[in-house]
Image (spheres, rainbow, N blue to C red):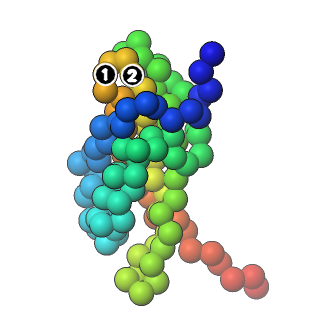
Amino acid sequence: MTDQHQQPDHPAVAVVTDRAAQRAKELGATEALEALRAELEQHPRLGRPIRTVTEGGQQVELYSTRIEGDPAEGRPALNVVHAYAPAPPWPPTVRIAAVVPEDPPHPAP
C-alpha cells in the first residue's frame, strides 16, 4: 500500500490555468505564483489536503496552500488551490486552478 503523502518518483508537470494566471497578475503575484508552480513540480502534494475527487475515472487530489503576503509590494497573502492527478496517465500533473486573496485581519474593537 502506498502512503498518500509519499512523493512521486518522477517530477510532475505543473501548469497554471488562464483564470488563475489572470488573478495572480491582478494581485501582483505573478512571480510568486510561478515560484509555487515550480515547487509543485517537485512536491505536488504541497499544502493542506482538501479532498479527493474522481474526474473522468481518474482520482484527483485537491490541495490548498498559502503564499505569504508582501506588504512592501502591497500584495496580500494568497490562498492557492491546486489539483494533483497522480499517474496514470503518465506523467503526473498539477493544475493550479484558483488564486484568492486572504481577507486582512480586522482589529479587535
| Furthest-front residue in this view | 9
Callout 1: 10 Å neighbours few (<14), some, many (20+)? few
Q: Identify the residue at horizontal 52%, vertical 59% (top origin).
A: 66
Q: In the image shown, does 95 or 10 lie closer to the viewer?
A: 10
SS under mark 2: loop
- 101 above or below 50? below
| Quadrant in which residue 23 is drawn | bottom left
| Quadrant in which residue 6 is drawn | top right
**Where's residue 82, x and y in %?**
43, 43
- 48 above or below 54? below
Residue that mark 1 sits on: 90
Q: Quadrant of the N terminus?
A: top right
Q: How far separated are the C-alphas under marks 2 and 1?
A: 5 Å
Q: In which quarter of the image is the C terminus?
A: bottom right
**Where's residue 28, x and y in %?**
31, 72
Q: Identify the residue at horizontal 52%, vertical 65% (top origin).
A: 102
* Residue 62 visible somewhere in the drawing: yes
Label 2 with label 1: CB-CB less than 8 Å: yes
- 66 above or below 60? below
The label on residue 87 is 2
| Quadrant in which residue 5 is drawn | top right
Specify the amino acid type for callout 1: Trp
Callout 2: 10 Å neighbours few (<14), some, many (20+)? some
Q: Identify the residue at horizontal 29%, vertical 65% (top origin).
A: 30
| Furthest-top residue in this view | 57
* Residue 97 visible somewhere in the drawing: no
